[in-house]
Image: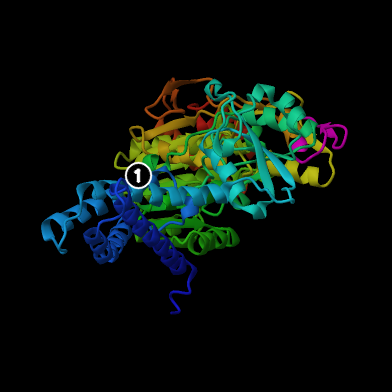
Amino acid sequence: MHRLNHPVYRNRVLQMAADGMLVGLSFYLAFRLRFLDQSGLPHRYWILFAQSVGLVVVGKLVVFSAFGLYQKWWRYVSGRDFLLIVRAVTASSAILVVAFTVLRPFAHNLPRSVAVMDFILTLMLIAGARLAVRLIVERPSRSGRLPKHEVLVIGAGSGGQMVVRELQLNPGLDATAIGFVDDDPRKRGMRMSGGLKVLGSTNQIAKILDETHPDEVVIAIPSAPGTLRAKVVAACREREIRVRTLPTVFELLRGGVQLNKQLREVRVEDVLGRDPIVRELDRVGAYLRDRIVLVTGAGGSIGSELCRQIAQVKPRLLVMLDHAEDNLFQIDREMVEERHFTNVEAVLADCKEPSRMLEVMQRFKPSVVFHAAAYKHVPLMEANPLEAVRNNAIATRITAEAAAASEVERFVLISTDKAVNPKTVMGASKAMAEWIVEAAGNKHPGTRFASVRFGNVLASSGSVVPIFRNQIERGGPVTVTHPEMTRYFMTIPEAVQMVIRAGDIGAGKGEVFVLDMGEPVRIVDLAHNMIRLAGYEPETDIAIEFTKPRAGEKLHEELFGLAESQQPTAARRILRAVRETPLDPEWIEATLNSLEHLVLAGDEANLAQRVVEMITAPGGDAAAVLYDE
């Protein structure tokens, strides 16, 4: 009795009871229609009907249940469910015919015309009842109380239709869709889900907004390019209309849309004008499945996203290493408690300690290592050059050597565009890290070494985005170093997926792979977009101040060096940087030894300048560069 009180079982019982009445009605009507031209149903067939109707009802309900017709509420039936109904009714009618013609349980045979009409009527009533329930549930509200919010939906595809359906099914949202906007010319003027009309294209968005006066606009195209989103957002901001969007392809959870949970405000990454990268993690990360994977810097912005995505492809063990206790605690807790991935090991260790790193590698025997641990705040590294070189260069050599000694199959370094023609200590230290990986690839052929170079990632540690956001929250001003300054941008999930993909290509000789970041973005345009997304007007509500570039800071970042050429790879949007003259591994080794000597001696006075000089002329006399007074 307690089980029957549960809503799920109670709903199934009610559905079966309704179907039972419909099956009995179909069987009765089949007899009546068969003898419609006569004065009434012959006596012998009244007896046959009375004797068999119970068996027919029970038998068909058993078949319907076996086909899973009672595992879904009628209000949510779809085209696939109607195909299932056809199969279930066909199977039950076939069993009915076999039972009456072969087993002959009753004195009189069932007329063939009755069996045919029973099949048709059963199919019509069973399918029709479910369709009627769905239409009633989804009908527009006829009550005196109208929803407060009218919503215009951008995109008449599957995402837009899911949004409309959710609005219809969930009165708690207190909103109703009033139409679609879609760029597909075949849909222009057509009526889509809920009988809503496609009012025009996004090129007509201003006119459509002025004619419909919606309270809200929902961008329901998860793969929409940033240019389209920016166009819609700009038109809505001018009219003070709220804009929200479905998650991007990286965020959209599988299995439909729950509007009240998944719709979010438009963010700056949505309007940068970049074409989105298709989410295909299951394919590109297949080589990590059932392997032991180690991520250094696992608590950082890149390292933590690496952990999230690697966990999705089900490694045998994910080893998360970081020397920052709080960051490591947070990602470990997220993996276990929020993502329910328990094949993890949190290791508190410092990549600058050779014995500790070798101990970790020997203990866990990882197959793949992603080295994301690095310092990356440019001004801070300029003030602390010893730590920049120690953490970004020397620690990379220590980690790479420990990986080779432990027979790791793949080692992937996370690099940066600041390593190209560097003018700062941070960039120089990352350039040295790339050299170290290249040298290790030649020195240790048993391990496949590679570096992955990319530009700024939005919202990462050190990114300008959180800085701008904080300045806007304080009321400004937003500080931009130069009106013409540009940077490459990519979202963290996109960059990490491409890092994982790059880890599976190449010959393993320390190649440098470069992510195609699209077109560079002017920082002042980024500032304008962020101010407008916050609901303000640049210069009117929030001031923008220009400051001069810091020492060594470039106006335009580069992805390839002057002595490098770019080659395509088997992976889309991943290029290979090929140096015209390969570096001498012995020179790299001697240079690193000399640098390490300076770092251990604490000779900070001229280290920054010497490192940059050395980087700008790689392959020269390291000792002369470092010690020439």
Q: Is residue 543 magenta?
A: yes
Quarter of the image with the C terminus in it = top right
Q: Which residue is mark 1?
A: 83
In the rendered image of this protein, does residue 439 appear above or below residue 364?
A: above
Residue 132 location (% of width, % of height): 49, 49
Q: Which residue is nearer to you in this view: 444 or 105?
A: 105
Quarter of the image with the N terminus in it = bottom left
Q: Is residue 553 visible?
A: no
Give the secondary structure at mark 1: helix
Q: Which residues are magenta?
A: 531-548
Residue 501 falls in image quadrant = top left
Q: Which residue, as the protein is rendered here, is positioned at the far right?
A: 540
Q: How is the image coloured?
A: rainbow
Which SS type dominates the magenta stretch?
A: loop
Residue 420 location (% of width, % of height): 56, 28
Residue 412 falls in image quadrant = top left
Residue 81 location (% of width, % of height): 39, 48
Q: Which residue is nearer to you in this view: 366 or 552?
A: 366
Residue 608 location (% of width, % of height): 64, 37
The three-letter code of the residue at mark 1 reads Leu
In the rendered image of this protein, does residue 277 appear above or below residue 265?
A: above
Q: Which residue, as the protein is rendered here, is positioned at the far front?
A: 39
